Image (cartoon, grey):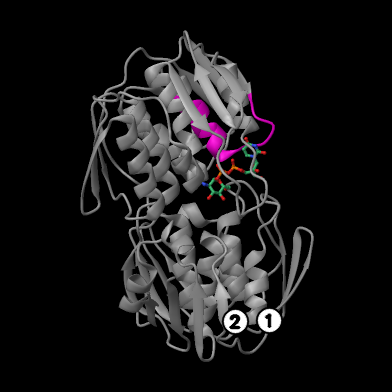
């Protein structure tokens, strides 16, 4: 069993280029299945979830090669339409491959994605979108058997702007006959990234990043080369780590607009932020103020994925910060772990009330999911003494080896086997 061992009390100082976005890479890899030929993706992060996506693609018959941050996918040789149960269970977002596989091969067989640590995460919206485009889906014994005679453009209205369902709908609609209109679509930067890549491949997608997306079906897509956007959630993680440790960071190769929903809250803590087109400079004294109520919302609102790390920050900020989690039902597991480190957090349904404490103390805690793990790292960096974080494989799903990244900035931490 692995653990991260974090020695608290060292300010993070230095410069860092932020990794490519996990949540863009996964749909872009699904798009590489849809598009016949050789796709080249630059800035593709070295993450566990990306590796699982590679396994899915290889199972389908793609040839996948990586050299540093560049990945080449040759999907000419696709010979299979099934994702094995074990890979569906490993990563819930494998479901984003469904629309791409059906559109490319005319059929797909996948299992329902496994249970999730963030509470129930149904896929009803994904299936409704795909059915709306004419895909026949037979559900039996936890298996989804999908087939299609001809994909037909359609009007799709999402009851909630689900990121994954919007991605699946876009992937399936690109080569459908006629026009597809998705209303109440998700507007996250990762949706825009997917649409930009597909348009480069010859798709006709208009309005990505807005509430209504229009897709005019094309008969053929050509593989292309593309650069994945920087990871806005990794960026927030490093900002929180810099702020809580009283650090000084220059974070490079970023898109500041992608975290516009977060920056005002960080500023309220009293840290100094200087933002230009591709960089953010942060300087913190380590003495933080509480923030006004943080309510997670679909983009451009405050991202749910940033909530755990911001809660770590709030737990050491003078005063009371209230969080309202509106996206996921069960996203406060880190609060319980932070409490073991001395944080004062009260939970009531979707609300968490955090009373800042002057010091956090090192403790034995568990990464229960990806961002909870990141929140514990942030807290551990500022705690007195040593924090041991078990199950760091959750963190590896979304961060290039986190101990290597943070040690470059002066953190003292290591991975114990
Ligand atoms: C994506 C991100 C994840 C982020 C989330 C919200 C990826 C790989 N993951 O996840 O990091 O936290 O967006 O920004 O991009 N829902 C349904 N039925 C569905 C689909 C979703 O009820 O068919 C609900 C979910 O249970 C959840 C909410 O909608 O409560 C948001 O989910 P969604 O936007 O789909 O998130 P993901 O695409 O799974």
Can see residue 337? yes
Q: Secondary structure at mark 2?
A: strand
Query: At 52% across and 44% down in the image, what residue appears?
Result: 92
Q: Quadrant of residue 288?
A: bottom right
In the rendered view, does 369 fall on the left or right side of 415? right
Query: At 48% across and 81% down in the image, what residue appears?
Result: 381
In the rendered view, does 225 fall on the left or right side of 27? left
Tell me which numbered mark, 1 or 2, is placed earlier along the sequence: 2
Q: Quadrant of the N terminus?
A: bottom left
Instruction: Name the quarter showing ligand 1.
Output: top right
In percent of width and height, residue 222 lies at 27, 23
**Is mark 1 in CB contact (under 8 Å) with mark 2?**
yes
The residue tagged 1 is 356
| Residue 166 covered by magenta stretch | yes
In percent of width and height, residue 255 lies at 41, 54
Looking at the image, the residue that sits furthest to the front is 141
Q: Secondary structure at mark 1?
A: loop
* Magenta-drawn segment: 157-171
Whether 237 is drawn above or below 210: the answer is below
Number of marks in picture: 2
Distance of label 1 from label 2 (alpha carbons): 9 Å
């Amino acid at each position: 069993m692995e653990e991260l061992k974090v020695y608290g009390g060292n300010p993070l100082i230095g410069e860092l280029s932020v990794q490519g976005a996990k949540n863009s890479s996964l749909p872009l890899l699904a798009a590489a299945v849809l598009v016949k030929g050789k796709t080249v993706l630059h800035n593709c992060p070295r993450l566990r979830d990306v590796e699982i996506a590679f396994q899915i693609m290889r199972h389908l018959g793609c040839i996948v090669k990586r050299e540093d941050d560049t990945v080449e996918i040759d999907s000419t040789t696709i010979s299979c339409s099934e994702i094995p149960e074990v890979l569906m269970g490993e990563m819930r977002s494998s479901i984003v491959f469904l629309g791409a596989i059906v559109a490319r091969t005319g059929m797909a067989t996948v299992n329902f994605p496994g249970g999730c640590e963030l509470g129930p995460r149904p896929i009803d919206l994904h299936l409704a979108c795909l059915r709306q485009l004419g895909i026949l889906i037979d559900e039996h014994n936890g298996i989804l058997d999908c087939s299609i005679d001809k994909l037909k453009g359609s009007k799709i209205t999402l009851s909630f702007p689900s990121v994954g369902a919007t991605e699946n709908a876009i992937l399936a609609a690109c080569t459908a006959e006629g026009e597809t209109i998705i209303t109440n679509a998700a507007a996250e930067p990762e949706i825009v990234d997917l649409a930009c890549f597909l348009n480069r491949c010859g798709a006709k997608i208009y309005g990505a990043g807005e509430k209504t997306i229009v897709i005019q079906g094309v008969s053929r897509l050509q593989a292309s080369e593309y650069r994945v956007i920087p990871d806005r959630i990794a960026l927030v993680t490093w900002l929180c780590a810099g702020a809580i440790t009283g650090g000084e960071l220059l974070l490079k190769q970023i898109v500041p607009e992608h975290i516009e929903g977060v920056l005002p809250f960080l500023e309220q803590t009293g840290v100094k932020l200087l933002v230009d087109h591709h960089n953010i400079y942060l300087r913190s004294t380590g003495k933080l103020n509480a923030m006004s109520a943080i309510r997670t919302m679909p983009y451009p609102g405050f991202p749910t994925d940033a909530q755990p790390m911001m809660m770590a920050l709030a737990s050491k900020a003078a005063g009371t910060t209230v969080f309202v989690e509106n996206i996921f039902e069960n996203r406060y597991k880190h609060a319980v772990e932070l409490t073991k480190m001395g944080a004062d957090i009260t939970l009531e349904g979707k609300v968490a009330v955090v009373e800042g404490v002057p010091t956090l103390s090192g403790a034995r805690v568990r990464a229960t999911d990806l961002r909870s793990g990141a929140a514990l790292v942030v807290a551990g960096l500022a705690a007195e003494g040593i924090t041991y974080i078990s199950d760091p494989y959750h963190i590896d799903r979304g961060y290039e080896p986190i101990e290597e990244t943070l040690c470059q900035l002066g953190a003292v931490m290591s991975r114990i086997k």
